[in-house]
Image (cartoon, rainbow, N blue to C red):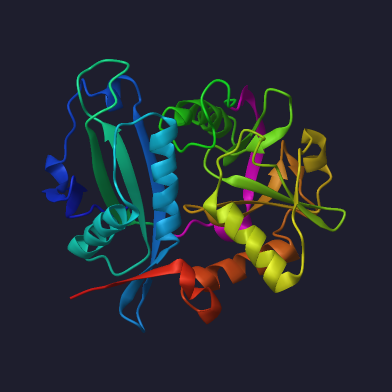
């Protein structure tokens, strides 16, 4: 990503190279950080940035802080205002990715819960070839964290140590990404995106109780395919072997958007090319986030530039 001019730290614009956190902060020593990944889409005709489902992301950040017992009291309006300021001061006029981080920065103790610093970073997000061609995926030997160990529905930095092991293994073995299983051997998700499957003509996604993040993009697609295609999405446990006989598979997430899966464990998904429903969903989603569908502009926060 292109380097930003500023990072917003506790409401102050700090030059990129000067934005620092103490090495003994609990955010570093005990992974006491939760965050959100948010996308902004530049509209040249309207000369503004469309930020997708900003309030929903900030609400999930609030929920993450509560579950992780942070002593922090940010309103949705305060959180959104800092995101908007970070976009405006960096003045990017292309598609961007933001990271909104709530970090415990107090005394270096495992039980420290305050103060909590809010940090907002922004950078460009270039297009990836596999968004069109699809990803080669493996099933990880690493198990996805369970709610009784570290809550997967919370977007906590600690969870990404688990996912990082899976992704590193996958890439060393020649795959683009990995899928992790629950402790019961059911399909959970990728460390960076949730999963959808088309099998026997039905659209399926693992239930929210299957050790997955409560994904805002997943929720968006469930809503969109119901309204636009008249399809109900089955939310249920998914067996590993179902992936091998699926008609279509795709990932979704704020960062990855909608990404086809071309193979699993070297077995092609159908003919190995993005499936027709995946492409329809991807195109619909991109129209929505880029402000091309008026009926869904309620999900967009418009950020205007000077």
- Nearest the viewer among 186 and 53 is 53
Q: Position of residue 62 (x, y in %)?
A: 39, 43
Q: Position of residue 109 (x, y in %)?
A: 26, 15
Q: Would residue 12 be found to the left or right of residue 267 on screen?
A: left
Quadrant hosting residue 287: bottom right
- Nearest the viewer among 275 and 77 is 77
Point out the stretch of residues depicted in magenta. Answer: 126-144
Going 43% across and 38% down the picture, which residue do you hit?
64
Q: Residue furthest bottom?
A: 45
Going 31% across and 50% down the picture, which residue do you hit?
75
Residue 7 vs 153, above or below: the answer is below
- Nearest the viewer among 67 and 46 is 67
Residue 96 sits inside the magenta stretch: no
- Regarding residue 126, the answer to whether it shows in the image is no
Going 28% across and 21% down the picture, which residue do you hit?
112
Q: Position of residue 41 (x, y in %)?
A: 40, 67
Quadrant hosting residue 21: top left
- Nearest the viewer among 58 and 255 is 58
Going 76% across and 46% down the picture, which residue do you hit?
268
Q: Would residue 258 be found to the left or right of residue 18 on screen?
A: right
């Amino acid at each position: 990503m292109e380097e930003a001019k500023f990072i917003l730290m506790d409401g102050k614009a700090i030059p990129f190279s000067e934005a620092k956190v103490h090495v003994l902060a609990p955010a570093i020593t005990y992974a006491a950080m939760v965050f959100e990944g948010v996308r902004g889409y530049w509209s040249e005709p309207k000369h503004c940035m469309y930020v997708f489902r900003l309030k929903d992301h900030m609400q999930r950040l609030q929920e993450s802080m509560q579950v992780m017992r942070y002593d922090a009291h940010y309103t949705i309006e305060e959180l959104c205002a800092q995101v908007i300021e970070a976009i405006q001061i960096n003045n990017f006029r292309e598609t961007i990715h933001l990271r909104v981080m709530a970090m415990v920065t107090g005394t270096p103790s495992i039980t420290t819960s305050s103060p909590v610093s809010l940090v907002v970073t922004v950078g460009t997000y270039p297009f990836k070839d596999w968004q069109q061609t699809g990803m080669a995926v493996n099933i990880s030997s690493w198990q996805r964290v369970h709610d009784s160990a570290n809550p997967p529905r919370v977007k906590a930095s600690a969870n990404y140590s688990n996912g990082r092991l899976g992704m590193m293994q996958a890439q060393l073995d020649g795959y683009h990404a990995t899928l992790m299983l629950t402790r019961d051997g059911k399909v959970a998700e990728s460390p960076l995106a949730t999963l959808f499957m088309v099998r026997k003509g039905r659209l399926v996604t693992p239930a929210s109780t299957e050790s997955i993040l409560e994904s805002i993009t997943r929720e968006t697609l469930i809503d969109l395919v119901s309204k636009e295609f008249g399809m109900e999405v089955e939310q249920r446990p998914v067996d590993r072997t179902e992936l091998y006989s699926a008609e279509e598979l795709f990932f979704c997430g704020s960062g990855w958007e909608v990404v086809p899966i071309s193979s699993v464990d070297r077995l092609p998904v159908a003919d190995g090319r993005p499936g027709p429903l995946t492409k329809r969903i991807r195109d619909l989603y991109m129209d929505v986030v880029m402000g091309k569908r008026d009926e869904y502009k309620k999900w967009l926060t418009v950020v205007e530039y000077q």
